[in-house]
Image (cartoon, coloured by chain):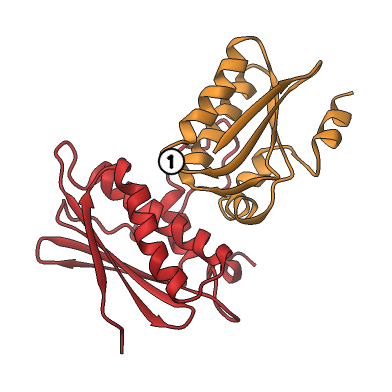
Amino acid sequence: MEIQSTQLEKAVVVKVSGRMDAENAHQFQRACEEWIARGTTCILVELSDLQYVSSMGLSCFLAVAKTLQAKAGSVSLCQLQGLPRQVFEMTRLIGLFPIYDSVAAALASLS
Amino acid sequence: MRNPVVRLQVPAEIASLKECCAFVRRGAEATGLASEEIDRLDLVLEELFVNIARHAYSPGTGQVEVGYSVEAPGRLWVEITDSGRAFNPLAGDPPDFSLGLADRPLGGMGLFLVKALADSVRYERDGNCNRISFVVSGGPGSGPAVQNKLA
């Protein structure tokens, strides 16, 4: 799994690529928590290259979303597709996150 | 008639997960499963394995045996056995999907996904062992049974 973060004016884009499993999911959560600790309240997660996510990864997404909700912020999912989209749908988590077709669409919703 | 079962024994810990998935993937590739089906297989295997690694022997340690058999082209049977405390991973209730973000628990999704993503899954307590087996297959008519349940 690779994580690349980019700070923009109104949000931080966290691009997650590869496979998020029980061994590495906490790295994603930690990366988000570091941004939150620095004052970020809007995280856009870019998922076009995420091939795989297990329940440990889902828990990390949920934990980050809960933390940001408590700070009146949000974590949005952009380009959720494939098996990751299927598991977000099956677990009904998809209804708990703002979902966008692209980072550009998510950014447009902020302006 | 099932083909011979190939088996691997590893310590029941998260650090063994990659070895386990790589082992079963050999069977998946031999049976000709497509990459999306192999991802589904990995997910079912991971959820069951992680559950055993976390709970079966806690606070002690133990072993897990993973076996697979190519049942037919495009159809892989996998069995996971531990000798930890008796636990039927299929017996739990599904998560409460009606809860909002603030109330939704972080856990409880893994074993739900097992039932949703495997073509079939079966548990038995055999002496002092937990034995769970599942099938993942490809092609028309295969895939997650939950699609129909959710429709």
Q: What's the amino acid at mark 1?
A: Gly
Q: How many marks?
A: 1
In which quadrant of the rendered view does residue B131 lie? bottom left
Question: Percent position (x, y) of residue B105?
Answer: 47, 37
The chain assigned the colour red in the figure is B
Question: Percent position (x, y) of residue A82?
Answer: 65, 56
Q: Nearer the viewer, residue B30 or A70?
A: B30
For chain A, the rendered hue is: orange
Image quadrant containing the C terminus of chain B: bottom right
In which quadrant of the rendered view does residue B58 lie? top left
Residue B103 sits above or below residue B134 on the image: above
Residue at the spot x=54%, y=77% of the render? B142
Q: Dot 1 surroundings within 10 Å: few (below 14), some, or many (20 or more)?
A: some
Subunit of mark 1?
Answer: B
Residue at the spot x=59%, y=23% of the render? A32
Q: Which residue is mark 1?
A: B107
Residue at the spot x=48%, y=49% of the render? B95
Q: Nearer the viewer, residue A94 or B98?
A: A94
Q: Secondary structure at mark 1?
A: loop
